[in-house]
Image: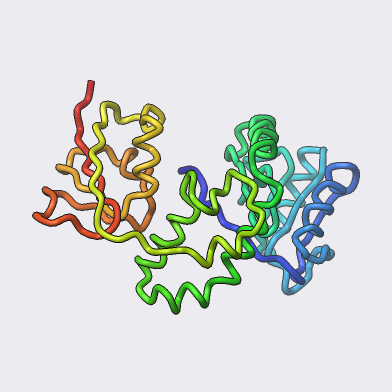
């Protein structure tokens, strides 16, 4: 992973923008959409800066000047000068999907964004807001964090009551019927390549849902990285009795 994706909350925060013309105008619109305030260089509370200057030498001078002031800087079309890159964004407020290529190809990121625009429902933000409203209710009904996560996972699973890839007319009503899955499920996944792009759709889905993974210690790290960050990684055999949730047994059989 070449970069750490983060979402920075900028509402009411000062952000420096250096440059003029259409590139600077585009950055200004993006900054303002995030609720930030565009300020001049030298603002004591600014932590982020954008440089939108076409001429290479001038862009480098401006970037170095902002960095000397302690700012993290993005320079339009200059990956070598940038501390961070800007993704293509799909906005389903409060849901944001960011697509980045680490500066390799803005055109590819834009093409992926356009595809996602066509498949993500317009009402996806309503589902997110309904889940947010239900947070306290979920904590009361499911005091255990793992049970709570499984209940929400069941709601948003493919074909579930709140499947995020479908339009949901009344998400609040569907949330009211949520229940934590009971018992344990064991799934076996055979991995034949160290390339995670060669995982089957079933394998990729199970890794994304697994509460824990069992393997013999030879499983490539790139495969294990496709699971949730909080999924347990266990080297060794399954216990005699299945644990609650989804356990995935990974079997390494390289071609």
Residue 31, by quadrant, is bottom right
The type of colouring in the image is rainbow
> Where is residue 227 drawn, in percent x and y?
36, 47
Coordinates of residue 245 in the picture (x, y in percent): 29, 57
Q: Position of residue 242 (x, y in %)?
A: 18, 55
User: What residue sits 69% from the left and 30% below the top?
Assistant: 107
- Residue at the extreme top of the image, as rendered: 255
Residue 8 placement, left or right of 236: right
- Toward the viewer: 192 or 42? 192
Q: Is residue 111 above or below residue 247?
A: above
**As displayed, is residue 89 above or below residue 130?**
above
Q: Position of residue 154 (x, y in %)?
A: 43, 55
Q: Nearer the viewer, residue 64 or 90?
A: 90
Q: Residue at x 78, y 70 (%)?
A: 43
- Residue 205 shown left or right of residue 156 in the figure: left
Q: Residue at x 58, y 44 (%)?
A: 165
Q: Would you identify the image quadrant in which residue 108 lies?
A: top right
Which is nearer the eye, 171 or 29? Answer: 171
Front residue of this view, candidates 215 and 185:
185
């Amino acid at each position: 992973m070449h970069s750490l994706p983060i979402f920075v909350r900028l509402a009411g925060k000062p952000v420096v923008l250096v440059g003029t013309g259409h590139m600077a105008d585009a950055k200004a619109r993006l900054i303002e959409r995030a609720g930030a305030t565009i300020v001049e260089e030298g603002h004591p509370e600014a932590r982020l800066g954008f440089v939108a200057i076409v001429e290479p030498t001038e862009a480098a001078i401006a970037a170095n000047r902002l960095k000397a002031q302690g700012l993290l800087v993005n320079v339009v079309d200059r990956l070598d000068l940038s501390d961070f890159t800007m993704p293509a964004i799909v906005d389903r407020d409060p849901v944001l999907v960011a697509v980045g290529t680490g500066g390799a190809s803005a055109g590819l990121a834009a093409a992926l964004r356009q595809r996602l625009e066509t498949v993500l429902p317009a009402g996806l933000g309503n589902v997110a807001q309904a889940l947010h409203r239900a947070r306290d209710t979920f904590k009361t009904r499911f005091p255990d964090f793992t049970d709570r996560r499984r209940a929400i996972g069941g709601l948003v699973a493919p074909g579930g009551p709140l499947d995020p890839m479908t339009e949901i007319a009344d998400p609040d009503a569907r949330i009211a019927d949520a229940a934590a899955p009971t018992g344990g499920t064991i799934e076996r996944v055979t991995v034949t390549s160290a390339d995670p792009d060669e995982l089957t759709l079933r394998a990729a889905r199970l890794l994304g849902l697994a509460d824990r993974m069992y393997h013999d210690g030879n499983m490539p790290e790139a495969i294990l990285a496709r699971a949730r960050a909080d999924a347990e990684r266990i080297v060794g055999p399954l216990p005699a009795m299945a644990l609650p949730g989804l356990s995935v047994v990974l079997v390494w059989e390289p071609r």
